[in-house]
C-alpha cells in the first residue's frame, strides 16, 4: 500500500492573507511528511473535501481537520463530505486543538504584541453553538492560563457569550490597567480584524504557520496513516 495522501481541511476565508497562510501551512506540512498534501475547505472556498477525495480516486487518504475546536464542521461536515466522495480508503484524525503546543504558540504571539506578566488576557475564539466545541475552547483557555501563570478569560467573536469587547470592558472596569487579547484563530481574516475593534491594549496575531503546528499536523497524519496501512494489510 502506498503512503496515504494528506487532505488538510480548513474552514475557508475571503481574506487573501488567510488563504495564503493555509497554502503556506500545507506546503510546510508536505515538506514535513514527504508526501502528497492536498487542501480542502468546508465553507466559503473550494475545493470541498469530497471533490479532493474524488480527485484522489483510489489513493488512500488521511483527512486532517485544521480546526482549533471540534464543532459542527468536524462532527458533521467532514464525515458528510467523506461519505459523499465515495472514497474507499479514508481515515480521519482529531482536530488540531486543543493541544499544549497551541498554548505555547499563543504565548509567543502575546509576548510579541507587548503582553507582560500582570496584564489581563482575553482568550478570543470564533465561537460555536456546539457544546463540544465550547468545551474544547475552555480546555484551550486553561492550557494557556497554565502556560502564562495567570488567569485567562474566554470570550467569543461571532457565536456565544460573553463577546470579546464586553470582556475587555469588564476587565478594565474591574481595575486592570492593561488588557491583551490572545487570538485563538488559525489565520488572518474578518474575525481577526474584529479583534482590533475590541478596545484592548494589544492584539496577538493568529496562531498561523509555526513549526509546532506543522509537527502537530504531521503527527496526526502519521498516526492515522499507520492505522490505515495496517488495516489494509
Image: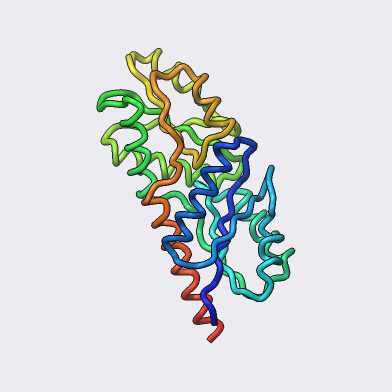
Up-down relation of residue 213 to residue 107 (above or below): below
Residue farthest to the bottom? 233
Task: Report x, y in % for residue 42.
Answer: 66, 50
Q: x%, y% of residue 107?
A: 33, 37
Image quarter (top left, top right, bottom left or bottom right) of the N terminus: bottom right
Looking at the picture, tell me which residue is in the foreground, 119 or 29.
29
Relative horizontal placement of residue 98, taking residue 46 as reference (left or right)? left
Q: Position of residue 114 (x, y in %)?
A: 32, 25
Q: Is residue 135 above or below residue 49?
A: above
The residue that appears at 49% across and 42% down in the rendered structure is 186
Q: Position of residue 108 (x, y in %)?
A: 32, 37
Relative to 144, does residue 24 appear above or below in the rendering?
Answer: below
| Chosen colour scheme | rainbow
Q: Residue at x 33, y 30 (%)?
A: 112
- Tell me how many marks there are: 0
Instruction: State whether residue 125 is above or below residue 63.
Output: above
Q: In the image, what residue occupies the spot 55% across and 39% down? A: 18
Q: Which is nearer the eye, 61 or 68?
A: 61
Q: Residue at x 74, y 64 (%)?
A: 84
Horizontal placement of 15 versus 209: left or right?
Answer: right
Amino acid at each position: 500500500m502506498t503512503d496515504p495522501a494528506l487532505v488538510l481541511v480548513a474552514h475557508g476565508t475571503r481574506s487573501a492573507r488567510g488563504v495564503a497562510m493555509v497554502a503556506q501551512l500545507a506546503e510546510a506540512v508536505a515538506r514535513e511528511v514527504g508526501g502528497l498534501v492536498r487542501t480542502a475547505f468546508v465553507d466559503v472556498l473550494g475545493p470541498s473535501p469530497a471533490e479532493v477525495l474524488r480527485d484522489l480516486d483510489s489513493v488512500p487518504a488521511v483527512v486532517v481537520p485544521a480546526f482549533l475546536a471540534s464543532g459542527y464542521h468536524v462532527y458533521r461536515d467532514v464525515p458528510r463530505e467523506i461519505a459523499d466522495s465515495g472514497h474507499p480508503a479514508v481515515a480521519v484524525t482529531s482536530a488540531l486543538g486543543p493541544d499544549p503546543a497551541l498554548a505555547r504558540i499563543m504565548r509567543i504571539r502575546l509576548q510579541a504584541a507587548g503582553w507582560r506578566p500582570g496584564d489581563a488576557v482575553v482568550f478570543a475564539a470564533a465561537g460555536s453553538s456546539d457544546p463540544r466545541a465550547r468545551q474544547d475552547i475552555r480546555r484551550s483557555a486553561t492550557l494557556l492560563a497554565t502556560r502564562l501563570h495567570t488567569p485567562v478569560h474566554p470570550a467569543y467573536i461571532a457565536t456565544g457569550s460573553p463577546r470579546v469587547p464586553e470582556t475587555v470592558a469588564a476587565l478594565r472596569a474591574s481595575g486592570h490597567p492593561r488588557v491583551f487579547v490572545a487570538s485563538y484563530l488559525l489565520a488572518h481574516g474578518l474575525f481577526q480584524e474584529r479583534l482590533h475593534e475590541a478596545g484592548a491594549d494589544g492584539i496577538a496575531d493568529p496562531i498561523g504557520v509555526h513549526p509546532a503546528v506543522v509537527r502537530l499536523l504531521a503527527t496526526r497524519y502519521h498516526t492515522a496513516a499507520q492505522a490505515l496501512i495496517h488495516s489494509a494489510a
